[in-house]
Image (cartoon, rainbow, N blue to C red):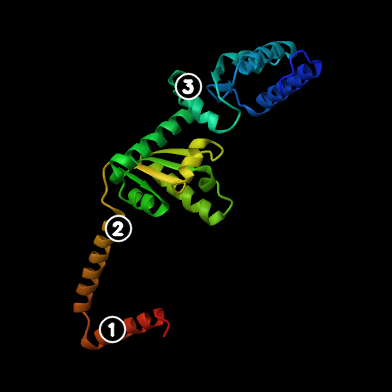
Amino acid sequence: PKKRTGSSAHSKAIVKFYDAIYRAVLNHIPFDKIKCVLVGSPGFQRDDFFKYLVAESVRRDDRILIKSKEKFVLCHASSGHKHSIEEMFSDPNIASRVTETKLVKEVEALNRFMRLLDTHPDKAYYGFGHVQKANEELAIDTLLITDELFLSSDVVTRKKYVQLVESVRERGGAVYVFSTMHVSGQQLQQVSGIAAILRYPLPDLDELEDIAANHEAFAEYESDEELTEAERQRKVEARMREEMKDMGF
């Protein structure tokens, strides 16, 4: 609500606004599972709301809020927009108070990936193909994936990413599923929505594919030596027909 000092209508609007937040907090936050609740705002609105929440929880005898009031952390935010969440977590004082929370660990993992991408790109892979290859090499230490991929409405897509996540966990890797509602999840989306921090450097994927292709060519060459002349001729003709078909003939 816009400020109109001394206005009773403004005061009622503020109370209505606080009551809406109070109900949302009560209905949607699982206090038995979470470790803290950040309350951020410009000015002193966060302090005023927290006083309202404490007083109202006592008045309504909402035991869960009374018992959980120590979980609320008040901090400065320049606005009510989503980018301010990232701003709050950039504050070292706030980060130190909520250091064990899932979101802070996600942000730390993403920041570490971004640093590696600049300094040691052979330990930072992104994109499904590259990450899948790294998993096959047992190289993934930490997997980062957006909920948009992990919980995709497309069954085939969801199954593909769920299998990858389960495989990484089975091989001892840590997995963080990022909400695309949060700034860190949106940043991860910009690099395909899936990324991995590796235990050890891997050569470039193109190099790995060249090695695999050379191996297959060598194996094919060895197998050709075991064919009769007629069989080799038929194989060459079949290959030529395939190549002509690919070229549209």
The amino acid type, in three-letter code, at marker 1 is Val
Q: In which quarter of the view is residue 176 placed?
A: top left
* Residue plotted at (65% across, 14% down): 48
Q: Residue 236, which numbered label?
A: 1
Note whether 242 is above or below 1 in the view shown: below
Query: Pointers 1 and 3 in contact (CB under 8 A)?
Result: no
Q: Position of residue 160 (x, y in %)?
A: 47, 53
Q: Residue 98, which numbered label?
A: 3
Q: Single out the mark in the foreground, 2 or 1.
A: 2
Which image quarter is the C terminus in?
bottom left
Q: Secondary structure at mark 2?
A: helix
Q: Residue furthest bottom?
A: 230
Q: Position of residue 93 (x, y in %)?
A: 45, 18
Residue 198 makes an appearance in the image: no
Q: Residue 159, which numbered label?
A: none
* Residue plotted at (26% across, 44% down): 201
Q: Residue 206, which numbered label?
A: 2
Q: Secondary structure at mark 1?
A: helix
Question: Looking at the image, which is closer to me, 168 or 181?
Answer: 181
- Residue 150 is left or right of residue 114, and the answer is right
The amino acid type, in three-letter code, at marker 2 is Asp
The answer to which of marks 2 and 1 sits earlier in the sequence is 2
Question: Could you tell me how many numbered marks the image carries?
Answer: 3
The answer to which of marks 3 and 2 sits earlier in the sequence is 3
